[in-house]
Image: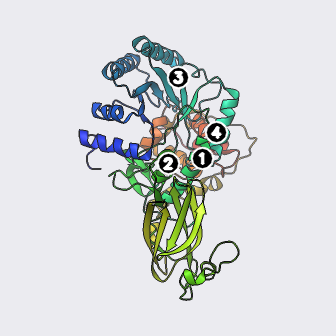
Amino acid sequence: LYKGNALTRQEHYEDAALIHELGANTVRLAHYQHSRDFYDACDEYGFIVWAEIPYISSQSNDPKAHENCRTQMQELVYQNYNHPSICFWGISNEITIAGEKPGLVEIHKDLNALVKEIDPTRLTTMAHVSMVPLDSRLHGITDLESYNHYFGWYGGKYTDNEKWLDNFHEKHPEICLGLSEYGAEGIITYQPDEPKCRDYSESYQAEYHEHMAEILMARPYLWSTHVWNMFDFGCAARNEGGTAGRNNKGLVTLDRKIKKDAFYLYKAYWSREPFVHMCGRRYAQRPGDADRLDGKTPAENKKGNGNGVPEASIAGGSTRVKVYSNQPEVSLYVNGELYQTLKCDKVFLFEQVPLFDGFTCLTACAGECSDTMTLEKVETKPEIYTLPAEEDEDDMEGAANWFDEAAAVDANAAMEFPEGFFSIKDTVKEVLDQEDAAAVLAGALYAMTGMKLKKSMMGMMGEKSVEGLMEMMTGMGMGDNVPENALQVVNVELNKVKKK
């Protein structure tokens, strides 16, 4: 934070130390050249590193671009050949996000051959955008392959991840498959009682990663998995969750001062250092589910209800407490008195924990490890814990139900592409260049994704047709609530806009 790329050796080593604390054993260094200081740190910690060049998103139309790409690939290998931490050279990332261009496969084969010529001792890999088809000619070029998937964030449900992975592995058992990006935004101020996708909360991010960690560790056919991202990072094109210029998918905040709950979830899976962590400490002021506990202490209500839950926690104010630990047993104490002991695997969920008027001190103990947090019972939940409505919400003209407000179109109606007017056959760049056409696209995409995408972000897919973009998003699980004839609806609305 406030330093941009002007990092010193000390900061690189601090980053590496945090990754080491997490228990991770591999780092993907995307998508550009990195400091020698960080490579040195990776060598010392024994991380397994994937290093790659900035050949991303879209193949350039400039014929000189490939030579530049070759030069960057050579320089990456020559400069870092002697770092023992590097095991994989990456040749591209999401290169088809703007559509597959002529010669793309041949270019990848050339880059792969170049790397093998320079360094035959290491493996090559690449990161596919989510919608690269199972029968794509890009498969099999590199030694290893990985996909970037965000099911459960940008679209679909997080349970779609294991369905996709198992289906791919069944159809392509010969391909060494990995997951090179996955994640969800987690802004630490947002603390809902019932987390849900795209609420940008720390608690949904934790829930998402609970599922991901479980299903990924259960699939030994994956050669690697790389969380996106270890740290929040600056990104000028983004404006999501009430936070401009930042990607909040990190397990640690941009200033490196706060480890989010999801950080400790992975530590529970990957670290051998005994620890216990209480989640939700930033949800410090809670209304509870009732007003009083009749003035009774936890000890006075130890009679229970037959399910191991004290009666007071049912009759009076209570809350849910989640704990992460790599130990087999965790005990929860309320104001110094034992409430409950659970035997679980990684995630310990204590239900209906008493929440007294004023402050309640909670302590989780696992062996010699302990963690404590204090909660305050309040009448009303503070507004800061809830994702605020966007200030420019009116500008979207109710875009959340954009398809409902757009013209009704017969699903069987023929598509028309009148000369001099926009259509879904136009590229995203062409549409964005004219305000009224851009508004149609922005409204449709907002209805599909729930995100207000800046032109700079949509511009990354500028050479893809509107039709191709929408088909890609639908294939990724976005747009569950849009009509089957969404393409026709968008086409009709674009047909109303005359090109200038």
Q: Give the mark, 3 or 2, whose residue is nearer the N terminus.
A: 3
List the residue tagged with mark 3.
101
**Residue lying farthest to the front in this orientation:** 368
Residue type at the position of mark 2: Tyr
Q: Residues within 10 Å of mark 4 (few under 14, many from 20)?
A: some
Residue 305 horizontal side relative to residue 322, left or right:
right
Location of residue 415 in the rendering, given as x and y in whole percent from the top left corner: 68, 37
Q: Identify the residue at horizontal 72%, vertical 37% (top origin).
A: 414
Q: Is residue 257 above or below residue 431?
A: below
Element on which disc 4 rests: helix
Name above or below for residue 257 compared with residue 436: below
Residue 446 x %, y %: 54, 51
Q: Are marks 2 and 4 in contact (CB under 8 Å)?
A: no
Residue 266: mark: 2
Location of mark 4 (residue): 475
Residue topped by disc 1: 214
Q: Quadrant of residue 492?
A: top right
Badge 2 marks a residue whose secondary structure is helix
The residues bearing labels 2 and 4 have C-alpha atoms spaced at a distance of 29 Å
Closer to the chain start, of discs 2 and 1, is: 1
Q: Are marks 3 and 2 in contact (CB under 8 Å)?
A: no
Measured in 3D between alpha carbons, the distance from the residue under mark 4 to the one under mark 3, in whole angstroms, is: 20 Å
Closest to the camera, between mark 1 and mark 3, is: 1
Disc 2 + disc 1, Cβ < 8 Å: no
Between label 1 and label 4, give the one nearer the viewer. 1
